Amino acid sequence: MELIETTYTVTLRDYPEELPARERIAAETRYAKELEKQLGGPEQVAAALDTMTNLEESPPEVVSPGDLTLLKAWGKASVAAKQAGFRDLGEGDGAYFEVRLL
């Protein structure tokens, strides 16, 4: 299995059944690769996460048109990454992928 060096982590949370580590890591890797494909690479994923964190703490009037474009791109990338991550696992009710900066 290929290791990806990055400045963020992806963790599968609340999957309804116990998964072998190999399957969990494969799902997290698929999710991360799809995010990177959609957003342009690991640096762009980290930058988007940083911006998203800052936006959560900002008043709505501070959101720029560029930020709105990023929000839309993040939403699209997240949907594609979720589909990739859950491929071969099936949808786990309540399960989600947590993405955090290191």
Image (tube, rainbow, N blue to C red):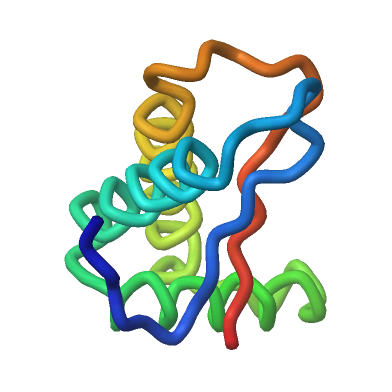
Task: Residue at 21% x, 70% y: name it.
Answer: 41
The answer to which of 27 and 48 lies nearer the viewer is 27
Q: How many marks?
A: 0
Q: State whether residue 58 is above or below residue 68.
A: below
The answer to which of 75 and 13 lies nearer the viewer is 13
Q: In the image, residue 18 lies at what x, y percent?
A: 74, 30
Q: In the image, residue 90 lies at what x, y percent?
A: 53, 12
Q: State whether residue 1 is above or below residue 50.
A: above
Task: Residue at 56% x, 82% y: name it.
Answer: 50
Q: In the image, residue 28 lies at what x, y percent?
A: 47, 49
Q: Which image quadrant is residue 84 in?
A: top left
Q: State whether residue 99 is above or below residue 55.
A: above
Quadrant of the drawing holding the N terminus = bottom left
The answer to which of 100 and 5 lies nearer the viewer is 5
Task: Residue at 41% x, 25% y: name it.
Answer: 83
The answer to which of 98 and 47 lies nearer the viewer is 98
Q: Which image quadrant is residue 10 in?
A: bottom right
Q: In the figure, is residue 71 to the left or right of 83?
A: right
Q: In the figure, is residue 101 to the left or right of 67?
A: right
Q: In the image, residue 3 lies at what x, y percent?
A: 28, 70
Quadrant of the drawing holding the C terminus = bottom right
Task: Residue at 54% x, 70% y: name it.
Answer: 9
Q: In the figure, is residue 94 to the left or right of 24?
A: right
